[in-house]
Image (cartoon, helix red, strand yellow):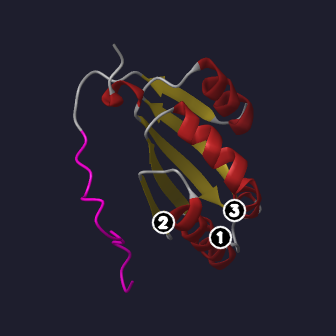
Amino acid sequence: MTTHDDTTLLFHNTMRVTDGHLEDFRDAIDRAVAFAREHGPQVMVQTFVDEERLLAHSFQLYRDSEAVRTHWRLADPYIKDVMEHCRVERFEVFGTPDADVAEGVRSGVGEDCELTFTPRATGFLRLPPTTGPTDTTPGA
């Protein structure tokens, strides 16, 4: 029997921001996350930017592989906009996606990107109550 925890996927995307593109990258990532917050299937999206090193880290939590496919269908224009200002250096998948999603990740990141898949061992997930919005964005 498959449980919810068995299908959960956590993506960690490490991006190198193109020199001179930091503000454009920030604008594009803000638009992408705002779209995901409103329309995306992700349980969580968090992005962190190390301005000195021009590195950005994006974490996205999905309930399952179907949620990843939904994200790809909905967010493609936003992903392309972000990618105009960076390149993916490393992509880590925590959990075990189905074969279709695993292949989609492999083909999406390209050969120059370090890609790892790490199966889940154990853990749990606490979700906030679904009675209202749970936006933790500063100033929101």
- Residue at which label 2 appears: 49
Q: Residue at 25% across / 57% down in the picture? A: 128
- Residue at which label 3 appears: 82
Does residue 124 appear to the left or right of 30 in the view shown?
left
Q: Amino acid at mark 2?
A: Val
Furthest residue in direction bottom, as rendered: 139
Q: Residue at 59% across / 53% down in the picture? A: 15
- Position of residue 44 relative to residue 37, above or below, is above
Residue 31 lies in quadrant: bottom right
The disc, 2 or 3, on the residue closer to the chain's N-terminal end is 2
* Crowd around label 2: few <14 · some 14–19 · many ≥20 (10 Å): some
Viewer-closest of 51 and 118: 118
Q: Residue at 28% across / 21% down in the picture? A: 121
Judged from the image, the secondary structure of the residue bearing numbered disc 2 is strand
Q: Residue at 48% across / 41% down in the picture? A: 11
Furthest residue in direction top, as rendered: 1
Q: How many marks?
A: 3
Does residue 32 appear to the left or right of 112 in the view shown?
left
Label 1 close to label 3 by CB (< 8 Å): yes
Label 2 close to label 1 by CB (< 8 Å): yes
Residue numbers of the magenta segment: 125-140
- Residue at which label 1 appears: 25
- Position of residue 54 relative to residue 7, above or below, is below
